[in-house]
Each structure stands twice: as C-alpha cells, then as structure tokens.
Image: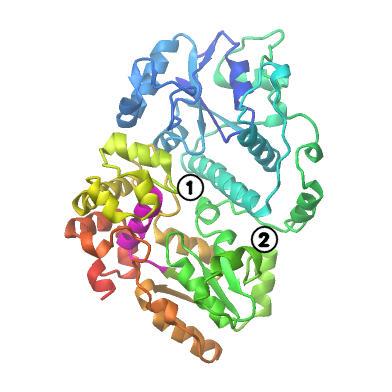
Amino acid sequence: MTQQKFKYFVIYGVMRTGSNLLEHFLNQFDAFQSYGEVFNPSFLGKPGNDTMLGIGRAEREQRPVALIERMIADAAPALPGFRLFQGHDPRILRRTLIDDSCGKVILRRNPLDSFISLKIAQQTDQWMLRNINKRRQAKVHFDLAEFLRYSEETDAYYAQINRLLQEHGQTAFTIAYDDVKDPAVLHGLARYLGTDEHLAAPKEGITRQNPGPLSEKVENYDEMIAALETQRDTTVSAEPRAAERGGLRFLTACTRAPVLFACIPAGPEERILRWMHTVDGGDPLRDDFHDALESETLFTQFGNRKALRLWLDERPERVCFAIVRHPLLRAYEVFEKRILPGGDDGFPMIREHLRTRYGMAMPDEDRCAGQDRAGLEQAGYTADKHRAAFQIFLEFIRENLSGQTSMRTDGEWAPQRAFVDGFNDLLPLDLVAKESKLLRVAAYIRNNLNLGATKNAVFKQSLEDGHIIPLSEIYTEAHESEARNAYREDYASFGFLPYPKEYS
C-alpha cells in the first residue's frame, strides 16, 4: 500500500557516494520511479540525453519546475524521484529542500573514500560497472591540498542542505554509503517515502567498481596516511559561508615577516605574492617566480586550524589583510581567462551555456590561447563583439548570483563580501583595502611592523597586463550599471567608484 505522503523525492549527494546503486534499488519497488540526474547541466537523466519527457535542455533552463511536474504526471501512480548533486541546478536545490511535498534523501560517504573513488573514475573513465569482467583498475596519486579542497567543497554542500532544512523546518532521511545494500535500511527508506511494499531479495545489478583497501588504490599510501595525520585537529565549520568562502586554503603568510594575506579569487594575487616575497628579502620581479612557487618554500600555508592558531599565537604583532578588486575588473579577469576559449583553466560548461542560452559570440580558440588580437580581428572578432560578449557575461553573473540560472556560482565571481566574512570567521582581519590603494597598504604594513624599505614596483605595473583587449578600451557605462546591479553589496560595503575613477 502506498500513501500519498510526498509528490516526489530527491536523492541529494555528491559523486561516488553510491547513488547509482541506491536509485537502482528504489526502482525495483513498484511504488517508485527515479529518473536519474535530470538537472545535470550536461544532460537530462543520463549522459547523451538532451531531452526527457518531451522537455529539452533549453526549456529546462527556463522552466525547471515544469520538468518535475512532467515527472509527477508520467510516473503516476508511482512516486517519481531524481538525483541532485553538487553542481546541479542551484534553483532546484533550494526549491526542493524547502518543499513540504518533496521526500528528501541525503546520501553520504566517507570523504576520503569518495575522493579516491572519484580520482580512479576520472583516470579510468569508468563511472558505473555492471559486468565485473570489464572492471578497469588503477592506482592514483594522493594530493593533500586537492583532497582538502574537495572536502571543503563537499562539506559546504552538505552544510547548505542542512541549513536550509533547519531554516524551513524540513526533515530528511539520511543514509550512509555502507548502508545502501542493507535491506532493513532500504525498506526503512521506502516507508519514509510512503510505501510498505517489501522486496524479498533486492537485485544488485551494479557492481562495486573499486573494492579492497585504500592501500591497493593509492600509490603513495604511506605518504597519504602521514599527511592525513597532520589534519587530526582540523575543525570543519557547519556554516556554509565559512566552509565555501574564505577557507584555510585561501590564506598565505610570509615565511619570515608576520604578514598574512587572505586571498579572494580573481583578485591581484600574483602581484601581492610577489610583493610579499620582497618583504621576505626576495626579488619580486624574478622571472622564475611561478616555478619557484612549485619548487621552493616561498610562503607558509595552513593545512588545518591548529597550524593557523599556532602561527597567530606566535605572532601577536602581525598584519592579516585582504584586498578587494573592483567588481567590473574582477569580472573581466574571469571573462578573459575562464570564459573565452583557449587554455586548460577555462570553464567549458559555462562557456557553452553562455553560447547557447545567451547567444554569446565566441572567438577562435587558438588565437585566444595565443593572445593573438590581430588574428582575432582578422577572423571577425572585433572589439565591439568583445564589448557585447562581456556585457552578456555580466548579465549572466547578475542572474546567476540572484539564483536565476542552473549554473553553479564559482568563487571567482562570488561576492567579495562573502569571502571577507568567511575570513573573519577564521581570524580577525586587520586590514581590508581596495586594490587601487595597494601602495598605501604596503606603506601601512611596512610602518606598522617596522619592516624597513620594501620594493613596491610590482604594484605600479598595469592592471590590464595579460588581457587580449584592455578593459579600458571597451568599457561602457552599461557595463558599470550591470556590475553594480550584480554586486550591490560589494559596491556599498567597500565604496567602489566607477571603474575609470577607481583606478585614475
């Protein structure tokens, strides 16, 4: 007997937490019909699908709730459901979590196990296994910094879920990866969703891809264990803001001077790090600076909160500072380096979304990668087209930050105020200043800590180095207006002037 407790259900999780198997089990109940990853930005339901139940990707973008309504109608009398992962449509994440008619299932797994499983899947390109004879095996290299970033992002996702549930008085059924195969837990989930139907023997059908201990999956296993041992005192915040914006990985300190920089993404990070290098006695203009960052210990970073507290305790006379960049210049930096084609550090999924959903004109990839402006113009991509494309990107940012798009909000265009608040949850910032005041910042730190003379030439370099077309050349008041609409709090909190006046 099925009771109409909910209209639909959602499985919330991250990749490699056992969601395929859980969905497979649920679909063996007559009472349920789960449709897969219906809000994955790249497909509908499963890879290769561009339509589902008569709804295509364009309509899903404009009317995402219509797809849920279509599933409810299609599955009747069964209860429909789908999987919603980190990085899927944030509008649907919020809507479903606060909806009384949605049955909420939260799936979790030990983050180290899911991280290693994800690394293996990425290396073997095998994401689900039905035939054990086709298993692809691989050993992966463990990188602590990469794992900490993964853990921080995953914690932020689950913290956001928990916070929304609490704020709106909602409850959820939480299930661990190791319990997905437990018939008692599976039937408990079925009762939560509204049926007393019983499966005599649930059929697995999906085989675990990476069985065995971690020592058989990680090539530097002993190094991994030693690195994780240093993280025992790490404290994870339950507050999404602190976990997602302004975490430990954004903090960098001088190795000698008591100076700590809290870095906001898409800001003047390199110029500040070069200046900090000269504070420690180095050459800020050295040609091998990027290589030295990889091969030498130029700075101090913090693997856990205990290390940060120790650094702070040992340096009562210190300066901890953050620099905020003009929102328009920051957006342009992301536009040129991440959105335009070319290079390995771009955002191809968001680029494709801008092309198909917003009609953004895209220039030639090879010429973008080679910073070949003359070639771009010969191919028809003019400064006017670049100006129009940037206007479209600003429109996307405004809609994205207000929860009107299916794309994730990346830290490189997230509001800077959120980062500053996140940093202040970790440590007291002594100074938050605008990029246009960097020379004054250098003088303040030098005088406050009695550092003596510092070389500030790196702060006198052009802000637009590395841009294919300078922002000053294509700037319009329409750009400024769109940026101000998107970043009202940043403009108000930090007192930004219009771009040309800010840096005059």
> In what element is the residue under mark 2?
loop
Q: Amino acid at mark 1?
A: Asp
Q: Main secondary structure of the magenta part?
A: helix
Residue 7 against residue 353 in the figure, above or below = above
Horizontal and vertical percent position of residue 348:
42, 41
Residue 86 against residue 320 in the figure, above or below = above
Magenta stretch in the rendered image: 324-339
Is 423 inside the magenta-drawn segment?
A: no
Instruction: Please indicate, yes or no, whether residue 164 appears anywhere in the rendered image.
Output: yes
Location of the C terminus (image quadrant): bottom left
User: For the point 41% across and 17% down, which residue is it?
Assistant: 71
Residue marked by disc 2: 304
Left or right: 347 as drawn, with respect to 62: right
Location of the N terminus (image quadrant): top right
Q: Nearer the viewer, residue 378 or 223?
A: 378
Left or right: 184 as drawn, with respect to 380: right
Residue marked by disc 1: 344
Is 333 inside the magenta-drawn segment?
A: yes
User: For the point 58% across and 64% down, which residue is it?
Assistant: 291
Instruction: Please indicate, yes or no, whether residue 340 appears anywhere in the rendered image.
Output: no
